[in-house]
Image (cartoon, rainbow, N blue to C red):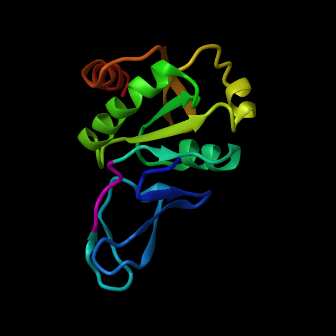
Amino acid sequence: MNTSPFHADERGLVRACPQCGRANRLTYERLGHEFRCGQCQAQLPAPDAPVEIPDAGVFAALTRRNALPVLVDFWAPWCGPCKMVAPELVKVAQTGAGRWLVAKVNTEENQELAAQFGIASIPTLAVFRDGREQRRQAGAMPAPAILQFLEQTI
């Protein structure tokens, strides 16, 4: 279930303006910059919640074209440690809003991505920059450890 206010597609993240409700696209190439609503000109907040990745096409676009480093959580709904790390990833996303993006790949729904990246255990966290995996870590971690892993990588 996607609880993020952002919806990912192959062109960027789509978010309703918190002021007027109009849908706005935040292109991957410009993440980290200021966005304004196309209707009311209100400033749109940076992504501050994990974004669900629906398929391999969106994953490729998000990791290759993103101006920000992307922390990807490979997880599954039945996985106890994955459930434990989920609220920690929310904290990491909030802490790094505008500096990095947190994305989630459900390995049950995206088995081809799990196979492509050789995901053998979950949760697995991987940092991507310019379409390339920089580093990965398997296992549940608290937010401070995830932040340390992320900051040492980027």
Q: Taken as a whole, is the magenta stretch helix, strand or loop?
A: loop
- Quadrant containing the C terminus in the rendered view: top left
Magenta span of residues:
44-48
Work out whether residue 58 or residue 105 is closer to the camera in this orientation and state it: 105
Q: In this image, 45 relative to 76: left or right?
A: left
From the viewer's perspective, is residue 129 above or below residue 144?
Answer: below
Within the image, what quadrant is residue 76 found in?
top right
Q: In this image, 62 relative to 83: left or right?
A: right
Residue 74: in magenta span: no
Work out whether residue 83 or residue 29 is closer to the camera in this orientation and state it: 83
Q: In this image, 65 relative to 22: left or right?
A: right
Work out whether residue 99 or residue 139 is closer to the camera in this orientation and state it: 139
From the viewer's perspective, is residue 81 above or below residue 64?
Answer: above
Q: Residue at x 33, y 40 (%)?
A: 93
From the viewer's perspective, is residue 6 above or below residue 72?
Answer: below
How far from the left and from the top, in percent, is residue 99? 30, 43
How far from the left and from the top, in percent, is residue 16? 40, 70
Within the image, what quadrant is residue 21 found in?
bottom left
Q: Residue at x 56, y 28 (%)?
A: 74
Q: Residue at x 29, y 18 (%)?
A: 145
How far from the left and from the top, in percent, is residue 116? 72, 27
How far from the left and from the top, in percent, is residue 47? 36, 52
